Amino acid sequence: MKANELRGLTDAELVGTISELKTEWRDLRFDVAIGKITNTMRIRKIKRDIARIKTIQTERVMAAELERLLSE
């Protein structure tokens, strides 16, 4: 997913997306352990997507905090 697409999602949708990605990541790690997986690049993409989402969540928290401080 691209960062612009993720920024358009709500906080609840981001949390749901992280949950789905972590489930898929867990399943892929299991497949790697038993030698069933053929596309190992998907694991890397999932990890990057999770990092992007967490970055966007942090940006939103920081923006809200800055807004709160400026309104005081």
Image (spheres, rainbow, N blue to C red):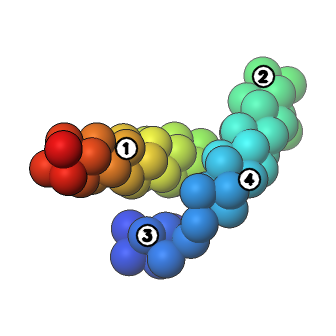
- Which of the two labelled residues, at mark 3 and mark 2, occupies the earlier sequence position? 3
Real-space Cα separation, disc 4 to disc 2, in angstroms = 26 Å
Q: Which residue is mark 1?
A: 61
Crowd tier of the residue under label 1, counting other residues whose Cα lies within 10 Å: few below 14, some 14–19, many 20 or above: few
Camera-nearest label, 1 or 4? 1
Crowd tier of the residue under label 3, counting other residues whose Cα lies within 10 Å: few below 14, some 14–19, many 20 or above: some
Q: Which residue is mark 3?
A: 7
Name the residue: 52% across, 45% down.
Answer: 50
Q: Is residue 63 left or right of residue 6?
A: left
Is residue 11 shown above or below 57?
Answer: below
Point out residue 4 in the picture as x, y percentages from the top left corner: 38, 76
Camera-nearest label, 4 or 2? 4
Real-space Cα separation, disc 3 to disc 2, in angstroms = 34 Å
Name the residue: 33% across, 50% down.
Answer: 64
Q: Quadrant of the C terminus?
A: top left
- Which of the two labelled residues, at mark 3 and mark 1, occupies the earlier sequence position? 3
| Labelled disc at residue 16 | 4
Camera-nearest label, 3 or 2? 3
Point out residue 47 in the picture as x, y percentages from the top left corner: 51, 41
| Labelled disc at residue 33 | 2
Name the residue: 59% across, 57% down.
Answer: 11
Kind of element beneath mark 4: helix
Point out residue 14 in the picture as x, y percentages from the top left corner: 61, 56
* Residue 27 or residue 57, whichever sits in front: 57
Real-space Cα separation, disc 1 to disc 2, in angstroms = 37 Å
- Which of the two labelled residues, at mark 4 and mark 3, occupies the earlier sequence position? 3
Amino acid type, callout 3: Arg
